[in-house]
């Protein structure tokens, strides 16, 4: 069995998609959580000065989506061939764009701009979710790639959860996305993770 | 032989890494280039309202890095196993971060901020390239993944070329990056592409 350690802040953020993949796979791993007070000491020791970082049988990998894709490949959640892998990658990338748009609001340091940025985010979310709903439909409506669960479906669930701080019911107007996200959340290992995960 | 069409602006930008992979592989494909004047007509017809778009034996894929990774997989440039693929992905993601930092300067619409943004970009580039130099060294110094050419090495060449508009000799202080990028540029198919590519 592989020796796995995932290092990230004690928060969901850019580490959570990897944790969801590991939870789904029921993998044993060390969920190392760094407190903000220790971050500036750790940062200069990291390859890109960033977290998350994955240690996998002694190999260290950085970049959040690289780590998640690697875990998805190792645990059979990446798609069965190059096309399916790319179909999943495409959806993950579109969802990261949406996540990044949310971070623009959350990490904004100018309080007077908050309302305007929130409106811009809502418009961006509407466009993204409309595109994703139609992409899911074009691929059969059940799953985003290969008509089987992949990490793209976990990422949908993850990002819809994450943007609830800005948009309380993000999938309300998107029946296929809402249904897929609900099905992901009802998977026993995912449900258990969501009920017991730390850092909330 | 696969039927391939890559659609993007008549520019390098986010389409060029895929074109470099196709050039290296000496693949036959349609290099469809959209003029700015036609863009607003085309945009609403696209899955995410974005380019590049790849058509591959009738399957359509979006998201620039998804497309490039798919082509890298198809043409044997992605790495030989999950670890090597992730090592290449990690470097590609770090280089995209650098590219995005460059776009903040290039697409900035407030001329009075240009100098400040350029200084911020130069600081970011210094950090990124220092990290990448040390990553390349830790992986043996010849190539970024698996000690063979992968799309991560093509992406290094691509991004170092792209940021020359902001930083004329970006790899001057990074001997391993400079050497790798030079070796990539000297590959016959890459050299030929750089000498004959349109849209410059």
Image (cartoon, coloured by chain):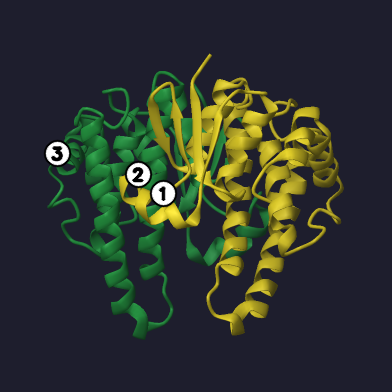
Chain colours: A green, B yellow
Q: Quadrant of residue B68?
A: top right
Cα distance, mark 1 to mark 3?
Answer: 26 Å
Q: Which residue is mark 3?
A: A179
Q: Chain of mark 1?
A: B
Q: Which residue is mark 1?
A: B50
- Say what secondary structure mark 3 lies in: helix
| Left or right: A182 in relation to A107 | left
**What residue is drawn where x is 70% and y is 57%?**
B163
The one of B16 and A3 positioned closer to us in this rendering? B16
| Left or right: B25 in relation to B181 | left
- Cβ–Cβ below 8 Å for labels 1 and 3? no
- Cβ–Cβ below 8 Å for labels 2 and 1? yes
**What residue is drawn where x is 83% and y is 46%?**
B178
Q: Evaluate whether label 2 is on the same chain as label 1.
A: yes
Q: Which residue is mark 2?
A: B46
**What residue is drawn where x is 40% and y is 18%?**
A80
Q: In the rendered view, tell whether residue A199 sits above or below residue A122.
A: above
The answer, for residue A12, to whether it is visible in the render is no
The one of A165 and B198 positioned closer to us in this rendering? B198
Cα distance, mark 2 to mark 1?
Answer: 6 Å
Measured from the top left, where is residue A71 in percent x and y? 46, 31
């Amino acid at each position: 069995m592989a020796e796995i350690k995932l290092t990230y802040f004690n928060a969901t953020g850019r580490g959570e998609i990897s944790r969801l993949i590991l939870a789904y796979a029921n993998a044993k791993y060390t969920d190392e959580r760094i407190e903000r007070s220790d971050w500036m000491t750790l940062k200069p020791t990291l390859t890109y000065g960033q977290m998350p970082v994955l240690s996998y049988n002694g190999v260290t990998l950085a970049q959040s989506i690289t780590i998640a894709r690697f875990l998805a490949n190792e645990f059979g959640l990446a798609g069965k061939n190059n096309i399916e892998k790319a179909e999943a990658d495409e959806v993950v990338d579109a969802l990261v764009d949406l996540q990044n748009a949310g971070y623009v609001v959350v990490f904004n340091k100018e309080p007077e701009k908050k309302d305007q940025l929130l409106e811009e985010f809502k418009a961006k979310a509407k466009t993204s979710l409309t595109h994703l709903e139609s992409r899911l439909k074009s691929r059969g409506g059940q799953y985003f790639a290969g008509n089987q669960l992949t990490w793209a479906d976990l990422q949908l669930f993850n990002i819809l959860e994450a943007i609830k701080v800005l948009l309380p019911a993000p999938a309300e107007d998107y029946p296929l996305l809402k249904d897929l996200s609900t099905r992901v959340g009802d998977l026993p290992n995912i449900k258990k993770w969501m009920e017991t995960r730390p850092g909330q």
